[in-house]
Image (cartoon, rainbow, N blue to C red):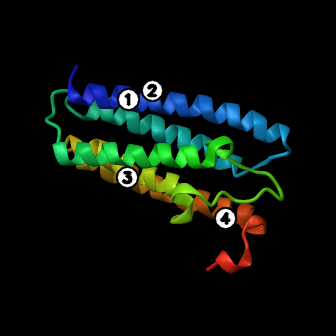
Amino acid sequence: MTTLGWVLLYLVLQRLGELAYARRNEGRLRAAGAREVGARHYPLFILLHGGWLVALAVGVPWNAPASIPLLAFFVVVQGLRYWTLASLGRYWTTRILTVDGAPLVRRGPYRLLRHPNYLVVVLEIALAPLIFGAWQIAAVFSLLNALLLAWRIRVESRALAPRRPLANDG
């Protein structure tokens, strides 16, 4: 299998695993009284990520050489992804679910960044095509992702604001 094939296989399996993990966590959170906000934009993320994977599969030659430094950076970014998931634990989902009164997670990368998972996705959407020289795919999907993330972060910030200590705002 080519490097592109391995990267695509990894991305598809990783996304499917995340969806299963998120679904399990969503059930637990909803049972604990969580409410969802921002459900309208969720299908757009499914389309974006699905379209990105299809664009990689059909828009990048399967024998395209891989940039080893970018591939190595991609692997490092995956470490940040799993650190983020582990830090959120049972609170990690692909949707915006909030449990009123629950404290916000402040461990792991959340000590340093408000949205480390979004940073991972931003980097991943750009890096995967750039590894194979597909800068057009990186540019188009990075722009679309930026637009969706701007919307999502606004919605999520409003939902979490009542749970955020005033001293940490700003």
Measured in 3D between alpha carbons, the distance from the residue under mark 3 to the one under mark 2, in whole angstroms, is 18 Å
Instruction: Give the answer, above or below, for where 118 lies relative to 169.
Output: above
Q: Nearer the viewer, mark 4 or mark 1?
A: 1
Residue at horizontal 51%, vertical 58%?
109
Residue at horizontal 62%, vertical 61%?
106
Q: Earlier in the sequence, mark 1 or mark 3?
A: 1
Measured in 3D between alpha carbons, the distance from the residue under mark 4 to the one under mark 2, in whole angstroms, is 30 Å
Residue 9 seen from this side: yes
Measured in 3D between alpha carbons, the distance from the residue under mark 3 to the one under mark 4, in whole angstroms, is 21 Å
Q: In this view, which residue lies farthest toward the top?
A: 1
Q: Earlier in the sequence, mark 3 or mark 2?
A: 2
Q: Is residue 52 left or right of residue 35?
A: left
Instruction: Give the answer, above or below, for where 92 lies relative to 17.
Output: below
Residue tagged by mark 3? 123
Q: Amino acid at mark 1?
A: Tyr
Q: Position of residue 30 (x, y in %)?
A: 80, 40
Residue 134 seen from this side: no
Residue tagged by mark 4? 157
Q: Which secondary structure lies at badge 1?
A: helix
Tag 4: Cα neighbours inside 10 Å, few (<14), some, or many (≥20)? Answer: few
Instruction: Give the answer, above or below, for where 151 lies relative to 4.
Output: below
Q: Position of residue 70 (x, y in %)?
A: 23, 47
Instruction: Tell me if label 2 and label 1 are in contact, CB under 8 Å.
Output: yes
Instruction: Tell me if label 1 and label 3 are in contact, CB under 8 Å.
Output: no
Q: In terms of depth relative to the viewer, which is nearer, 148 or 130?
A: 130
Residue tagged by mark 1? 10
Measured in 3D between alpha carbons, the distance from the residue under mark 4 to the one under mark 1, in whole angstroms, is 31 Å
Residue tagged by mark 2? 13
Q: Amino acid at mark 4?
A: Ser
